[in-house]
Amino acid sequence: MSYTLKPGVVTGENYKTLLNAAKEGGYALPAVNAVSTSSVNAIMEAAVKNKSDVIIQLSNGGAQFYAGQGCPDSFEAKVLGAVSAAHHVHLLAKYYGICAVLHTDHANKALIPWVEALIGYSEEHYEKTGQPLFTSHMLDLSAEDIDFNLSESARLLTRMAPIGMSLEIELGVTGGEEDGVGSDDDIGADNPLLYTQPEDCLRAYELLNPIGHFSLAASFGNVHGVYKPGNVKLRPEILKTSQALVDETHQTGATPLDLVFHGGSGSEKDKITAAISYGVFKMNIDTDTQFAFSKAIGSYVNENQKAFLYQVDPEDGSPYKKQYDPRKVLRAAETSMVERLDEAFADLGSVGKSLAI
């Protein structure tokens, strides 16, 4: 089947179209964390360059930084930073000529009020435009018992579904820490918590699917960050088993669950390919793009050391304004981030597969 969409932020049925195209086409989209206009613009630039659609997401800390570290109320900063970034993407994505998904990343129990506040902004946006501000939010209650995890997910999805929003949940534990959610103590190839149980996936499907659209971050040994080889063992076949159980129980077809791969940075290429074949449509990437962005700044400073010590050369008086111009530094970082995302688009097989027309 051939799919096409108008460029811009996709929500509701258009989001499902984007997702179905990826699953049927055997590819996935990178979900890239942003913290500023520079990183948002680099993500969109990379998507255009690779003729791919993309998922732009913010963590609570990234949203707070977007609003400015000087914002006096940290909670309001997390809310308003995310809202500001969303409006930025809504304004520019269609002019970049891409389909963009707007998503917020891990929100644990303490961050439920953050998600609820953002849903409120989407409700207001929906009343004015017929479209929510965000495509989806993630509720990560994997550290809680599964009864609370699923009941709270159902409560929020009941509010989100009428305005065409999707909810991402997590079952099992994605090891490592990201913006205060999770812990490095989880990491270890023999930790059973790192592997989601198929029965839990079935339970989530049976509760949430009748309410609205949801996606599932199932743990198969994946972790946030990049760690020593051998310390983490990826087992994507767990995803296949979970899909099969739902299909056998409800005769849904091969991949009824819309799966998310967290902790994609540094993952083995063959494991990425296997995960996509089992129904993964979204892979998170943050650590690698952070490194690419910051490494380029460090390299630029090293190559222009005098410009970051003096405004003019102390020996010949020549000015260094062009070298220390913040736009030069940030552009080097953006370019490096784009190059790392080139690799991500290729790994996920989405190059040349944008639905935007």
Image: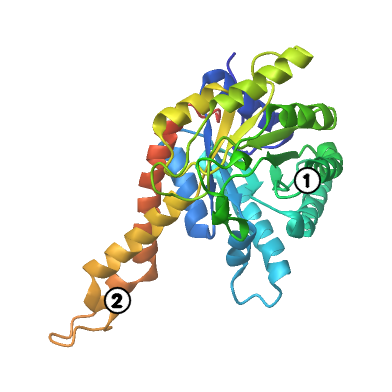
Q: Quadrant of the N terminus?
A: top right
| 10 Å crowding of disc 2: few (<14), some (14-19), many (20+) | few
| 334 with respect to 55 (left or right) | left
Count of labels shown? 2
Picture residue at 65% right of the left edge, 62% below the top: 81
Residue furthest toward the bottom? Answer: 314
Numbered circle sitting on residue 321: 2
**Would you place residue 25 above or below residue 357 in this image?**
above
The amino acid type found where label 1 is placed reads Asp
**Residue 279 appearing in the image:** no
- Provide residue 41's location: percent of width, then percent of height: 49, 52
Look at the numbered disc 1 and give the secondary structure of its residue. loop
**Would you place residue 307 above or below residue 140 in this image?**
below
- Provide residue 43's location: percent of width, then percent of height: 48, 47
Numbered circle sitting on residue 145: 1
- Provide residue 2's location: percent of width, then percent of height: 58, 16
| 331 with respect to 100 (left or right) | left
Q: Quadrant of the C terminus?
A: top right
Q: Nearer the viewer, residue 208 or 236?
A: 236
Quarter residue 259 falls in: top right
